[in-house]
Amino acid sequence: MPRPLPPLPWLEPDDPFPPVEQAWGANTPHPGLLAAGGRLDSRHLQRAYRHGIFPWFSGDSPILWWSTDPRMVLQPAHFRLHRSLRQAIRKAMATPGFALRIDSDFPAVIRACSQISRDGQNGTWIVDDIQAAYTQLHRDGFAHSVEVWMNGELMAGLYCVAIGHAVFGESMFTTISNGSKIALAALVALCRREGVTMIDCQQNTGHLAFMGAAEIPRAQFVAHVAEQTQQPAMRWEFAASDWADIIPLSETTFPHTAHTDE
């Protein structure tokens, strides 16, 4: 006879989150599921991320809050810049019309991420309520987009949450070969410059593991977040010379400036 599932707390709009140790474990249908309900807005998202919690749900379900164990993270120092990506970055930098921008059109990035078809998924978890909440989080200075532009058109990008020096990757998209990987590499370069030692990836995927991500215990991750959210805010700007944090200056030149939008 199957073991009954542990009770799932239902949160009223301003209830505190349960301790992450109460999340469903590995032997349940949904490992990492912590609670349902609550409120989805900038203030509550900040509170959730400070405790290693994130929302993930489809359009026909209540708000679901998660804290997975183990936690997939990418340490910028362990980022694997494979030869093909290194070549793609150099080619992009040498292409007239290419620009790497930060926060020039966050709503367009999160909207594009919601429209990407993904293997094994029907629909998207980046529903309208998620887009609205994270766009407000962006306006409040705690969510950012890294964008690949070509001739004035947004071609690829990612968005993330950042509180102090704690960085949480969310989603990415691309319409060109290697576009999202270039955006991720730029985020890694920015994090190296700012002294960020860990980027949250939430869950394990082969793609992230190929780029150097690995799992760590949730307790270690939560302790890291508690410490890093107390650090000063990062400088969310990117210059072409920042590529030198992952590509030695001796290997490339920077004929076109990557920049933030005016």
Image: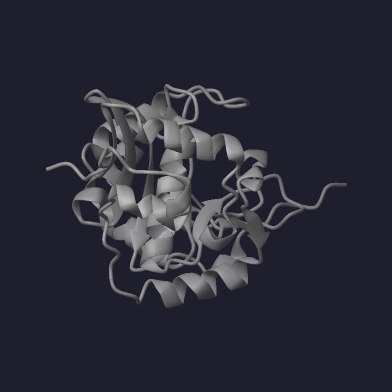
Q: In which image quadrant can residue 242 be found?
A: bottom left
Front-most of residues 174 and 126: 174
Q: In which image quadrant can residue 45 be found?
A: bottom left
What colouring method underlies this structural image?
A: one colour
Q: In which image quadrant can residue 13 be found?
A: bottom left
Q: Position of residue 133 (x, y in %)?
A: 29, 45
Vertical placement of residue 212 versus 93, above or below? below
Vertical placement of residue 15 versus 150, above or below? below
Q: So how many labels did they put on this image?
A: 0
Vertical placement of residue 134 versus 92, above or below? below
Hey, which residue is sitting farthest front in the picture?
250
Residue 125 in sight in this render: no
The image quadrant where one finds the C terminus is top left
At x 70%, y 58%, the residue is 25
Front-most of residues 101 and 139: 101
Q: Position of residue 151 (x, y in %)?
A: 24, 23
At x 62%, y 51%, the residue is 212
Front-most of residues 101 and 72: 101
**In-image side of 91 versus 102 (left or right):** right
**In-image side of 240 versus 168 (left or right):** left
Residue 199 in sight in this render: yes
**In-image side of 94 versus 176 (left or right):** left
Q: Position of residue 15 (x, y in %)?
A: 37, 64
Hey, which residue is sitting farthest left in the picture?
262
